[in-house]
Amino acid sequence: MTETASSLPVSRRRISDDHLSLLIGAAILIVIAVGALLYFTTRSSDSAVIGAIRGEVQGQFRTSDVSCRGLGFTMTNVTRQKIYACDVSNVAKGDRPNGHIDDNAFTRCYVQAVNTQIVDVSHAASIEAKARHESVPCR
C-alpha cells in the first residue's frame, strides 16, 4: 500500500522508442569502432615481419645480400604463421648451412613465431611440399 511516487510526470519517466533506438545504435557504433581499433592495432604488417626476418637472416649468415618475400605455401599441421622465403647470397663458406656448403647463394624459409622469435622452417617446408607433390623454393 505504500508506493513511492516519482516526482516526474508519467510522460517523462520512460525513454521514448526513438531515444531508445538512438541509444542502441550509438552503443553498436561504439562497439564496432572499438573492435576495429583492436583489430588494426594488434595485427602485424608484412613489412614489419619481413624487416625483422631480413635482419635476423643478415646476422645469421653475416651478409647484407638478403631479400625476403611472403610465400603462398602453408603448413597448417606445423604452424599457422605465414611462411617467408629469403634469398641469401654472398655467404662465406664458414657461415653456410650444411645443406648449402658448396653454394654461396640459396633460399631459406622462415616464420615469425607468436613470441616474435624467427624460426627457420626450411627443412619442414620442403618435406611438407614433397609429401603434397608441391614445391617450395627453400630446402
Image (spheres, helix red, strand yellow):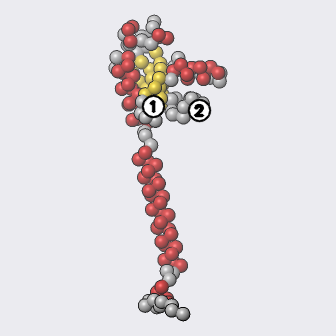
Q: Residue at x 42, y 30 (%)?
A: 117
Give the residue type at disc 2.
Answer: Thr
Q: Residue at x 46, y 49 (%)?
A: 39
Q: Which mark is residue 51?
A: none
Q: Quadrant of residue 118?
A: top left
User: Left of 28 or right of it: where is 50?
Assistant: left
- Seen in the picture, residue 19 relative to 90 is either above or below; the reply is below
Q: Nearer the viewer, residue 66 or 5?
A: 5
Residue ranking furthest to the front: 1
Location of residue 124 in the rendering, given as x and y in whole percent from the top left corner: 55, 22
- Seen in the picture, residue 100 relative to 131 is either above or below; the reply is above
Q: CA distance from mark 1 to mark 2?
A: 15 Å
Residue ranking furthest to the bottom: 1
User: What residue is shown with label 1?
Assistant: 112
Q: Which mark is residue 76?
A: 2
Q: Nearer the viewer, residue 99 or 73?
A: 99
Q: Nearer the viewer, residue 8 or 29?
A: 8
Location of residue 82 in the rendering, given as x and y in whole percent from the top left corner: 51, 33
Q: How many marks?
A: 2
Residue ranking furthest to the top: 102
Q: How dense is the environment of label 1, judged by Cα within 10 Å: few (below 14), some, or many (20 and up)? A: some
Q: Residue at x 38, y 8 (%)?
A: 94
Give the residue type at disc 1.
Answer: Gln
Q: Residue at x 47, y 66 (%)?
A: 27
Q: Earlier in the sequence, mark 1 or mark 2?
A: 2
Q: Quadrant of residue 136?
A: top right
Are the two marked residues, 1 and 2, in contact with CB atoms closer than 8 angstroms? Answer: no
Q: Secondary structure at mark 1?
A: strand
